[in-house]
Each structure stands twice: as structure tokens, then as C-alpha cells.
Amino acid sequence: SNAADRLSVVAGDLVSLGEVRHKDQHCVGMLLVILTTLASDGHGLGSGGVAGERWRMALGRAAAVAIPLRVFFEHAENVDMVTAAGICLRCMTYGSEESCAHAARARACPILLSTLRSYADQPATVRELLAALANCASMRSIKEDFQSSLPQSAEVIYHVMEQSSDREPDVLAQGCRAFGALYATANNEVNLGLKPGEKMKTSSNLQWSKLNNAIIKTVIGITVNKGDAVEGSAFEVLGSSRQQKLEDTRRRLGELCMHLANGSLASGPQFGRLLSLSGEPTAECTPRWNSLRSRLQERSERKKAPPPETQPDSEG
């Protein structure tokens, strides 16, 4: 259509400008803001409805993901530029197969893992990079790049979760979602068909001991942000009631992480955050999460309930 053609022309012009001025930080920074604005609701917080989808299609055809990916090479020392590039990449790869395909051809997986390693202690940057990586993982070659570099590639994600999840709970959720997307292939599934209440299969590639360290740090961070006191270890708190609250939060986050990692929650492309700063599931997965939790509780109650008594047959 004429409208789609016009969008494609503008998208192509933006990419051409990025190719010519790729060393100019101010120009590239403005381009990242423009691309993020077009591919979202204008602020990078929502998908932008039909308009955002049309722009993502046009930017995908123009291979606009080359602009944020190039930032990770040429402006890697600038944390603000890297964060903006992560936001831009997350927005453009949301539901855009063409953008994900271009990112895969550009070897986005090792690029993003290397950048994550460099900015492990920057929660805002890590969150965006993990979200973008999980979106790109819809491409088989992204998964293959990740799995061919195991265990080092997985160690990067465990490390950034431990370093940043205490200040940004969504880092934990995005890391688990990334694991679920990166490990899921036709030959190597991480419990993608897991039914509510079913236990994790023993073939899982996830190292739950390392993941639990990140969960505990997230619990401590959430507790401190709420103004509660934490002493010593994760569960050495003042008062038994506060200790119970910490344990309940740890258990709840553990359940959420398990379902994010096995694909029963937030599978496929996601746009925004999955956990709020208070550790509560956001609108991205709240309806499904509440439904899943209720089914798990019902199943547990049925197991606890005594079997119905059989009535003897009446004679006569």
C-alpha cells in the first residue's frame, strides 16, 4: 500500500543516515530515540498498537537493527548509548521476524552476551539487553550460537542476574525468560510442555543452585526497598513474621522463575517488564500467572482431600 511504501522509504532513509554518521555519538543517539519512538508507543513502554506494528515491519525490512547492534561495537564505552541501543533493539525485535532474522545474521547473541558481561552491574542496561536477547531467540541460529558456547554463555546470564537483580527484580525475570527461549529447540526442550503442577524434568539444563542465589538477592533487594530490615543472611531478619514474609517471597519468585524458564509464562516475544520493582508480576504475565497459580492451588487441594467414601449398595 502507499502508506506502507512511505514508511519503508522513511525507514530506509534512517538506516542510510545511521550508516553515514555511525561514528557521531549525538547523531546515533538521536537515531536510537527516533527508532524507539516509532517502534513503540512513543516512550518505549508499550507496543504502540497498529502504528507501532507497522513501523516495526518497515524497520525490519530496512534492517534497522544494524544501528543499535553497531553501537555495541563502536560506542561500547558509553553506558547511556548502550542502554538506549538495548531499548531500541528490544522494541524493534518485538514480534518482528525480519528484525530478529537480521539480528541473527549479525551474530547478535555473542554481541549481546559480551555487552552483558561488560555492564553486569548496571541493572537498567542488563534488563534491556536480556529482554532483547530473549526476543531475538525466536531465531534458531541465535539458540545455536548460545548453546555452542555453553557453559560460558549461560554463566554470563547467571552472573548478571546475581549482580543486578537486587536493584532491579525484572533482571531476574528477564534472565529466566531468556533461558527458556535460548534453550528451547526441537531437540533440546526445557519443559516447554510442562503442565501446571508438573515437576521439572531432570534433563533441564538450568543450574537451579545458581538461579537460587539470584532469587535470594532479589528477595533481599525487594525487602530493603520496602524499608524492612535484613541482617546477615537472606533470612536472618528481625522477628519470625518478617522471616516468614521473606520465605514466602522467595518461594513465590522461585515458582515464577520456574515457569518463565520452562515457557509456561511469557513465552514468545515480550515488550515490557515482567516484574515490578516490588517484585509483583506485571500485566505482561499477571492474568496467566494468576490463572496458573489458582490451578496449582486447586490441584494441591484435590491431592490433600480425602477420597470420597463409597456407599454400599442398598438391598431390595
Image (cartoon, helix red, strand yellow):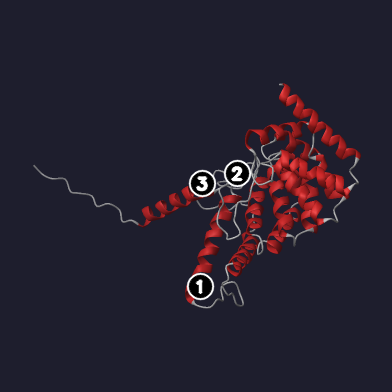
Residue type at mark 1?
Answer: Arg
Q: Are marks 1 and 2 in contact (CB under 8 Å)?
A: no
The residue beneath circle 2 is 267
User: Is 299 placed left or right of 5 in the picture?
Assistant: left
Q: Secondary structure at mark 3?
A: helix
Labels 3 and 2: the sequence-earlier one? 2
- Tell me residue 305's x, y (percent): 33, 56
Quadrant of the rendering where the N terminus is positioned: top right
- CA–CA distance between discs 1 and 3? 29 Å
Q: Nearer the viewer, residue 229 or 111?
A: 229
Quadrant of the rendering where the C terminus is positioned: top left
User: Looking at the image, is 78 positioned above or below residue 234?
Assistant: above
Q: Secondary structure at mark 1?
A: helix
Disc 1 crowd rating (10 Å Cα; few below 14, some 14-19, many 20+) is some
The residue beneath circle 1 is 242
User: Is 257 placed left or right of 103 in the picture?
Assistant: left
Count of labels in the image: 3
Q: Secondary structure at mark 2?
A: loop
The residue beneath circle 3 is 288
Residue at x 74% of width, y 44% of height: 89
Q: Residue furthest top?
A: 1
- Tell me residue 3's x, y (percent): 72, 25
- Tell me residue 137's x, y (percent): 70, 43
Query: Quadrant of the rendered structure where residue 171 is?
Result: bottom right
Disc 3 crowd rating (10 Å Cα; few below 14, some 14-19, many 20+) is some
Q: Nearer the viewer, residue 70 or 186?
A: 70
